[in-house]
Amino acid sequence: MKRRILLATCFTFLLALQIETALAEETTNLLKGNINDTNEQYRSEYYAKKLHESYKKSKDETEALVVDGDLLINQMLGNDFLKEKRLHLNIIQRKMFLKRKTLEELYNSNDLSLDAYEYQIEKVSTESFIEAAKILSDIEFEKLFGFQKIEISKAYDKITEPLPE
Amino acid sequence: MLKRIKVMLLVVFCTIFAFFQSAIAGKVYGLRTNLWGVPIYSIPWIQHTYSCVSNLGVVTCYAFPSGSTKTGGTIAVTSVNESVGVMRAKCYAGCSMSYGVNGVCHQHTNRVIYPSNNHPEIPTSVTGYSASRWLFGARGTNWSQCVSKCGAY
């Protein structure tokens, strides 16, 4: 008799745990959000989900990174951001990633020293901001990158300095 | 006597089973992200982020490339459902990443918190994150190598 009671208690306890898990999953599914959600947290969860899906689908890392950048544009400048400017930004970013890939190959084949490699990476990165600054307005630039166009000049001075010996 | 032993064994079995059930239910795991300001070259300035993985009361924190893991405010607390999630988070934290080449602290933090519910990322309100994401993506330019090494989640 005692054993039966004990067994029943055990199973009830396990059943309660299972129900709790299922409920937690259901709540998680409800909180996935959507692109136009007024709640920032839910909207950002939507983008996190989209980002996850794009990396999962894409076999080419460069393209996945460009999609990532496109989602960033949506998040910072809105889904209705000018298509022309958006495409231009995609091109700038793709060009930057491809240049970096070439530099990585040169570095891996010992055709580039570590110092020169890091310097070139910085240069390519800064150049991408300079290119983006040409097509974005001051407000758009600050909204997208979180700093002002004027601050690029400091980074530009840095990349035009001679490479350290 | 034999009956008592049987009952005791049953109690032990049920307790162990219930413990693993609760672990799968994600009651005890949590990931935490904190931030504080540190300047870096190329992007005017960024807020530094780091991550902590809590597993059965043991908290392990990861700062990339280095720095304190005690200061700053919490910006995101999420949970992982399975022990394998904690294992993955720790493995992602150890993936190779060259600072300023493959990513910065933001990308590293995003890698660690990746196994938690809905694969979150640090909020865009973190200063410098949108700029670093433009340069390195959300989880670094060599994220696929990290997934190949540790396994997908």
Image (cartoon, coloured by chain):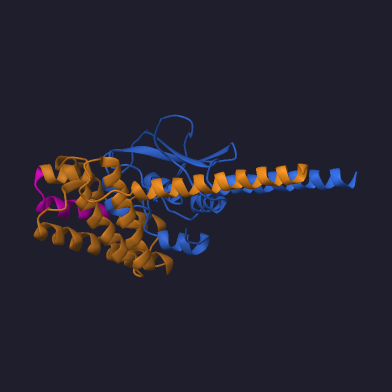
Residue at the outermost front position? A1
Most frequent secondary structure within the magenta stretch: helix
B47 left or right, relative to A15:
left
Image location (x, y in percent) of residue B48? 38, 38
Q: Which of B100 and B13 lies nearest the eye of the viewer?
A: B13
Residue lying at 14% horizontally and 58% vertically, measured from the top left? A86
Chain letter of the orange region: A
B146, above or below A144, in the image: below
Quadrant containing the N terminus of chain A is top right
Chain letter of the blue region: B
Q: Which of A56 and B108 lies nearest the eye of the viewer?
A: A56
Q: Which of B118 and B25 lies nearest the eye of the viewer?
A: B25
Residue lying at 14% horizontally and 60% vertically, measured from the top left? A88
Q: Which of A75 and B102 lies nearest the eye of the viewer?
A: A75
Residues drawn in magenta: A123-138
In magenta stretch: residue A130:
yes
Count of numbered circles in the view: 0
